[in-house]
Image (cartoon, rainbow, N blue to C red):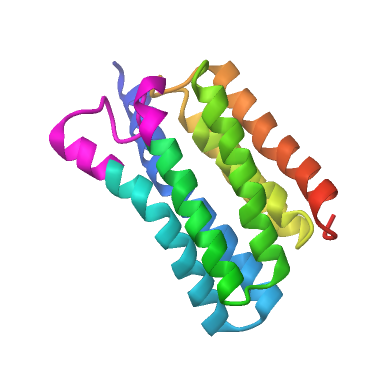
């Protein structure tokens, strides 16, 4: 491996973590909550509730990595996702209930419900094909920001393109898996926003 390709590999690895789906979900929630609730206290609560929903899946991954029972922290084999994706879905159900109980703005609760529906779709797809979750979740975040701000949506869309590209040099995904993730994340989110909310 020459020096330039080594630099590209290192950069791709770094971007895969910096622009991890959990990070982008938390950033998106912070932006949505700040604009909808206009309260830093409410935003911190919304972030905490989302983080609680993410914890079951993230802790499971950390446990499996510690035991050396998975190929990589990003779960490179689709078979390794069969437990963790339902754990994330279960966590998101808990987050949705907490959003309802704490009187979160409608768009936050509706967004979590849409996220759950998309998560079910990703779980089903992953039984048969290793779609890129980095690409799908990042483009989902971009789509959620479309009703809020075109500039923020464009910024998140750029992050989605970057992290999708980053999955290729490290051979974690094929071009088709990344493009499929982008299309699923952005397209399905926009359709569900139009059908289920008044924000698009």
96 vs 172, left or right, is right
Q: Residue at x 57, y 73 (%)?
A: 101
Residues in magenta, as a range: 61-83
155 vs 50, left or right, is right
Residue in the foreground of this view, choosing between 19 and 12? 19
In this view, 67 is above or below 95:
above
Q: Where does the C terminus fall, quadrant-wise?
A: bottom right
In this view, 40 is above or below 31:
below
Q: How many marks?
A: 0
User: Is residue 158 among the parts visible in the rendering?
Assistant: no
In this view, 80 is above or below 95:
above
Q: Residue at x 72, y 43 (%)?
A: 189
Q: Quadrant of residue 40?
A: bottom right
Q: Position of residue 94 (x, y in %)?
A: 48, 58
Q: Position of residue 147 (x, y in %)?
A: 79, 58
Residue in the foreground of this view, choosing between 1 and 44? 44
Q: Is residue 65 magenta?
A: yes
Residue in the foreground of this view, choosing between 11 and 67? 67
Q: Position of residue 96 (x, y in %)?
A: 56, 60
Residue in the foreground of this view, choosing between 29 and 87? 87
Q: Quadrant of residue 4?
A: top left
Q: Is residue 164 magenta?
A: no
Q: Residue at x 62, y 66 (%)?
A: 31
Q: Quadrant of residue 109?
A: bottom right
Q: Position of residue 130 (x, y in %)?
A: 49, 21
Residue found at the far left of this picture: 67
Q: Residue at x 14, y 35 (%)?
A: 67
Q: Where does the N terminus fall, quadrant-wise?
A: top left
In this view, 5 is above or below 35:
above
User: Is residue 112 among the parts visible in the rendering?
Assistant: yes
């Amino acid at each position: 491996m020459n020096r330039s390709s080594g630099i590209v590999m290192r950069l791709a690895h770094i971007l895969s973590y910096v622009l991890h789906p959990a990070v982008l979900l938390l950033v998106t929630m912070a932006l949505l909550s700040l604009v909808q609730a206009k309260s830093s206290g409410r935003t911190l609560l919304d972030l905490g509730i989302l983080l609680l929903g993410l914890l079951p899946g993230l802790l499971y991954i950390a446990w499996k990595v510690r035991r050396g029972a998975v190929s990589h922290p990003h779960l490179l084999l689709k078979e390794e996702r069969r437990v963790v994706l339902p754990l994330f879905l279960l966590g998101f159900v808990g987050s949705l209930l907490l959003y309802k109980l704490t009187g979160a703005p409608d768009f936050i609760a509706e967004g979590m419900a849409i996220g759950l529906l998309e998560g079910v779709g990703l779980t089903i797809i992953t039984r048969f094909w290793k779609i890129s979750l980095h690409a799908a979740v990042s483009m989902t975040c971009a789509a959620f920001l479309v009703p809020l701000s075109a500039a923020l949506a464009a910024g998140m869309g750029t992050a989605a393109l970057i992290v999708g590209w980053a999955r290729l040099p490290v051979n974690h995904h094929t071009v088709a898996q990344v493009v499929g993730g982008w299309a699923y994340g952005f397209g399905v989110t926009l359709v569900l926003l139009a059908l289920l909310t008044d924000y698009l």
